[in-house]
Image (tube, rainbow, N blue to C red):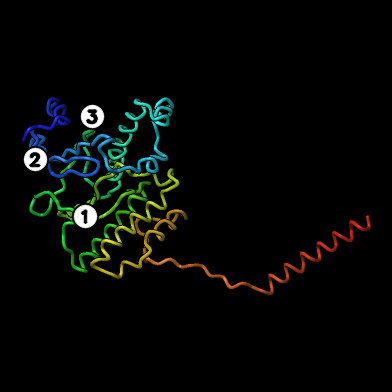
Amino acid sequence: MKTPKRLLPLVSEGLVDEVLRQLMSGKEATVYIVRCGEEIRCAKVYKDAEQRSFRKSVSYQEGRKTKNSRQARAMAKGSRYGRQMQEEAWQSAEVDALYRLAAAGVKVPQPYLCHEGVLLMDLVTDADGHPAPRLNDIELSVEQALEFHAGLLGQVVRMLCAGIIHGDLSEYNILVGADGPVIIDLPQAVDAAGNSNAGAMLERDVANLAGYFGRFAPELLDSQYGKEIWRLYEAGSLTLDSELTGRIEVEQRIADVDAVLEEVKLALQAEERRRLYQQAA
């Protein structure tokens, strides 16, 4: 096929030998299958901000670090330079997240480089070597749904232990590779400790999983794994081996009426002593 304009720099620099075909086009990027020497990989070409349909970038950017104060001020003002910096930060967030998560053992595509708005990474394939389908495009048995759900919860926990929350996780950005589900599309990934929306984003990610897999295994629809995972994380007790139940125990204390009345009595007595002391003075 004709080489897309955005991929020409990678071809001219020898990073890509041939563009084979377009794989998919989504809300934030177009993905192409490319040949790099003897390896078949994929190139994710980010769309300009004006073309993207993903409009929630502000809440995701909280907690992200900028290179210097000048860039931070420009991004806050929304100047032309600031918008350029925001685009670079948006793209580098996915690269940084992929490297961190791959190092942590999370099932994500292995990244290689990000050059002028193009992310070069592994092509996820199925057992026959074909590009892996999205989770949304396959039918599941009850057993498969439960297995995939459990495996992805483990990946969410592993991500959180590495300090990252996907932020937009759903059946549309999970591929079913030869070795099971692989998580993709991470430009909106957030720092779990640095974003005030982190807990809500994690719970939404996990709820999305329960909602999708609950179509095949309805027992998952009433689960509360997101709240459970976040509680463990906030308590500092979340580990890769944490046993999850999907249930939250609500602490219910029975009021001790006698103790309350005793406290009121003591308070009244103290107030009476204070009043008598003031009169005597």
- Which residue corresponds to the image point at 11% horizontal and 41% vertical from the top-left? 22
Give residue 278's position: percent from left, percent from top. Answer: 89, 56
Residue wearing tag 2 = 21
Res 238 quadrant in image:
bottom left
Other residues around mark 1 within 10 Å, as few (<14) / some (14–19) / many (≥20):
many
> The N terminus appears in which quarter of the rendering?
top left
Give residue 204's position: percent from left, percent from top. Answer: 36, 55
Q: Tag 2: residue type? A: Arg
Nearer the observer, 181 or 169: 169
Res 154 quadrant in image:
bottom left
For residue 88, side relative to residue 126 (left or right): right
Label 3 to label 2: alpha-carbon separation: 20 Å
Give residue 18's position: percent from left, percent from top. Answer: 8, 34
Residue 51, disc: none
Give residue 263's position: percent from left, percent from top. Answer: 72, 67
Residue wearing tag 3 = 116
Residue wearing tag 1 = 181
Q: Earlier in the sequence, mark 3 or mark 2?
A: 2
Other residues around mark 2 within 10 Å, as few (<14) / some (14–19) / many (≥20):
some
Q: Tag 1: residue type? A: Pro
Label 1 to label 2: alpha-carbon separation: 23 Å
Q: Disc 3 vs disc 2: Cβ atoms closer than 8 Å?
A: no
- Which residue corresponds to the image point at 39% horizontal and 38% vertical from the top-left? 64
Q: Disc 1 vs disc 2: Cβ atoms closer than 8 Å?
A: no
- Which residue corresponds to the image point at 30% horizontal and 62% vertical from the top-left? 210
Q: In this view, does 162 lie above or below 242?
A: above
Q: How many marks?
A: 3
Q: Which residue lies furthest to the bottom in this view?
A: 258
Q: Tag 3: residue type? A: Glu
Q: Disc 1 vs disc 3: Cβ atoms closer than 8 Å?
A: no
